[in-house]
Amino acid sequence: MGSRQDARALAALVVRVVLGWIFAAAGWWKVFSLGATQHARTLFVEPYADTLLPAWSLWIAGTTVPFVELGGGALLLLGWRRLPAAAGLGGVLILVTFGHLLLDPLFDFSAHVVPRTLLLVLLLALHGDDRWSLDAWLARRRSPGSPPG
């Protein structure tokens, strides 16, 4: 340890694992404790019933988000399929931002959306440095000597 590359790899690992745990834990709770249907009903369908959004779209989004969070978080923890996982989690953050602003244009994002978004952007910025991921390990096995990507 000690080189700039090692520091960037460590930063990528820490960001990926922290963000993975945040989303995996939220998804786990929404899927196995609350239930995806209850999540959809209480956080999507009921609050947005009087908006321009059709009920069917609220049910689809509300039942899908917990599984995207659980799966995307788990993939980040493993370091496998990091870009698709980040894309899915980024989509959740965009959806949540849209929804909150639809109900309250002055919604305070500082406790939920902003930290996750900043970690996701940092993770994407460090993507090529994340050599301790399963993706990087698999890439090294396929072509020894190539940089992780």
Image (cartoon, rainbow, N blue to C red):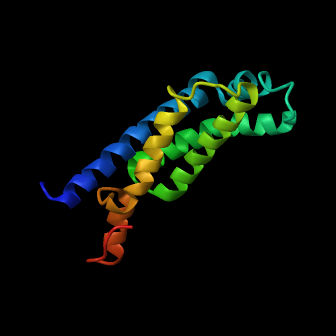
Q: Quadrant of residue 8?
A: bottom left
Q: Residue furthest left?
A: 2
Left or right of residue 96, residue 75 in this image: left
Q: Residue at x 52, y 46 (%)?
A: 72
Residue 141 in the image, given as x and y percentages of width and height: 32, 72
Q: Quadrant of residue 49?
A: top right
Q: Residue at x 65, y 35 (%)?
A: 96
Residue 24 visible in the shown view? no
Image quadrant where one finds the C terminus: bottom left
Residue 82 in the image, given as x and y percentages of width and height: 46, 55
Left or right of residue 28, residue 149 in this image: left
Q: Quadrant of residue 137?
A: bottom left
Left or right of residue 87, residue 20 in this image: left
Image quadrant where one finds the N terminus: bottom left
Residue 13 in the image, given as x and y percentages of width and height: 31, 49
Residue 13 visible in the shown view? yes
Q: Residue at x 75, y 31 (%)?
A: 102
Give the total of numbered labels.
Answer: 0
Residue 38 in the image, given as x and y percentages of width and height: 70, 23
Q: Residue furthest front?
A: 106
Name above or below for residue 38 compared with residue 5: above
Left or right of residue 50, residue 147 in this image: left
